[in-house]
Image (cartoon, rainbow, N blue to C red):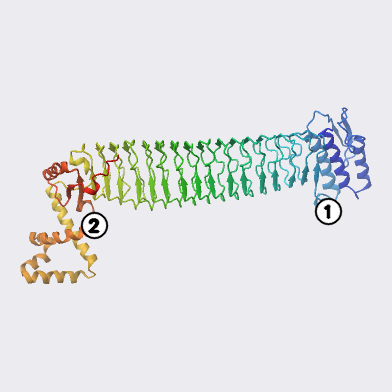
Amino acid sequence: MGILSFLFGKEIEKVVKNLEGSKEEDIEKMEEMEEMQTNSSLNLPSKLDSEPVSDIESPLEDDKKIENNITESESAIEVKHAIEKEKEKIISEETPFEEGLGQRERKSIAIPEGEQEIPSYAFYSNQDIDVVTLPSTLDKIGESAFDGCRKLEMINFSASLKTIGKQAFCNCQSLLEVDLSNCIEMAEIGKNMFLGCSKLEKVILPAGLKRIANYAFNGCQSLLSIDFSNCTELTEIGENVFSKCGKLETVTFPASLKSIGKETFCDCQSLLSVDFSNCTELTEIEKNMFLGCDKLETVTFPANLKRIANYAFYGCQSLSSVDFSNCSELKEIGKYTFNKCKNLKSIDLSKCTKLEFLEKNVFDGCENLNTIVMPAGLKEIHAPLCSVLGQLCKVDFSRVTQLRTIPSHSFGLGCDKLRALAIPNGVTEIEDDAFDELDYLKTIFLPPSLTTVGEFNQSCVEIYCFSPKLEELEPVVHGCDYDDDDEDEEEYDDEEEYDDDDDNDDDNDDEEEYDDEEEEDYDDDDDDDGEDYDDEERENNEDVESDEDESDDNKDEDDEESENNSLISGINLYVLPQYVDNYINQRNAEGISEKVLNIQEIPQKFRCYYENN
């Protein structure tokens, strides 16, 4: 039986039913249309007459005729539109609303047995169909066959169905469920097939499925879960397939999966966890794949993962755990990959032995990230590695052996809790301003391999230099604002006096009480000394100044957190024992005070720090 005859006959039958109770003259005119299909349309013959249909009188205009040259070769959509055009005129102009479309009962279509194909656009944008029943003989549904059927709620898919064209059910906004489990020969879900099916809640996929094309389920806002576990032959999921599925919570992936396109789960705002551990052939996480997944909490990567592309987890605000323990093959993490993952607390890349470089801003905006463990094979850092990490207190380079340069601005602003940093052995150069934004960095370890040091920071108060190649003092403390002449040292003394006064203001609520107390102490010893103390800033009494400096220096050492304990008030430089005298001689030759630059041996507890590297 021809699908064109089926569609053509059924449409005439609909028009007749909808016009029951209408004027007799309209019924007579419709009967003329029925005569055109005598023994062919209402009786559903096997095919249309080969002769063209002509001289159909319009029920609304007696003098107007519609000439339809319909043959088997013409598409079903042309037949359908010609019939619907006449039907719409009758209902809109001659029939009251309550007798027309507004009061219709549920519409269902049953495609006759024996049909093997529904042509492309066969029911395109049909606003009446609610239910479709497909025959057991059907093996193909054409492109956009039911596209835009906004009232379509149910459709059965027979076991014989092999192929569904792209956009076949696109924008079927009332479709609730799709069960393709019986379609054992179906290998592909076409492009845009269920795009925009906003009420679709459940999908059951065929076991023999091998590929899902781009945008297949994009915008299915009511879809709750997807289970691929029975799709043992599925190898490819295209781009944007589940993008904007706002209620999607869980996805179960098959072991056979080899590739997932970019933005596949973008803006799936209810997705809770992702586990790729069974996907042994999956090697890449593409660009923007999980961008905007606000509720995503955990991710487990596959063992053979080699690359994570840019923005892959951008804005996953609930992500608290990322498991890299199986990622021994990982070679690249793209820029902004974990940007704004505000709940991420730690990153351990120690098992990623082949990870060679990190792109810039990988961890930007991870406000609660406190620890980053770097991989052993790291060769290159694209600055800045991260910024606005308010809780970051540890960056572990201890396993890194192949990194040669710490670039300028390696760390951005906002890493205020990072107080200590150990540069890995193997690094030969620290570029200018490498740690310029780390305003609160106090301690730094310089490795044995280091040969060149730029101006790295002005806030460090402890420098541990293990390098035998840095025999000159100046490169080690380059940029640390020590005073290197007598005039500067005098300025240092004056500033210390000023700072001492400020410290005493903090320790005593009343500055006058402090002055009185000091005057009494000096009066007991010598009235002249007391007068000199009162006038010390103007006359620079050396005896009083010396006593006061000694006392206040002790206070400064006890108060490590004080802002006044800046580099200008003392750098502690720890060097290898054999270089202590050399550095002291250089310091003295340059006229630098011991209070400004204190040089000592590296403490015994740190002597073995770089031995394993």
Around disc 2, counting alpha carbons within 10 Å, would you say few (fewer than 14), some (14 to 19), or many (20 or more)? some
Q: Which mark is residue 248?
A: none
User: Could you say where residue 393 lies in the image, as x and y percent from the top left?
Assistant: 35, 51
Q: Which residue: 33% across, 47% down?
A: 437
Q: Which residue: 46% across, 41% down?
A: 326
Residue 201 located left or right of residue 272:
right
**Which mark is nearer the camera, 2 or 1?**
2
Q: Quadrant for residue 118, please give it.
A: top right
In this rendered view, identify the residue nearer to me: 581 or 550: 581
The residue type indicated by label 1 comes to Glu
Q: Is residue 197 above or below residue 187?
A: below
In this rendered view, identify the residue nearer to me: 119 or 124: 119
Q: Which mark is residue 564?
A: 2
Residue 298 located left or right of residue 493:
right
Q: Quadrant for residue 206, please give it.
A: top right
Around disc 1, counting alpha carbons within 10 Å, would you say few (fewer than 14), some (14 to 19), or many (20 or more)? few
The residue type indicated by label 2 comes to Asn
User: Could you say where residue 279 lies in the image, as x and y percent from the top left?
Assistant: 54, 39
Between discs 2 and 1, the one toward the N terminus: 1
The quarter of the image holding the N terminus is top right
**Can residue 298 be seen from the camera position used here?**
yes
The residue at which mark 1 appears reads as 98
Q: Which residue: 64% across, 50% down?
A: 222
Q: Is residue 277 above or below residue 535?
A: above
Secondary element at tag 1: helix
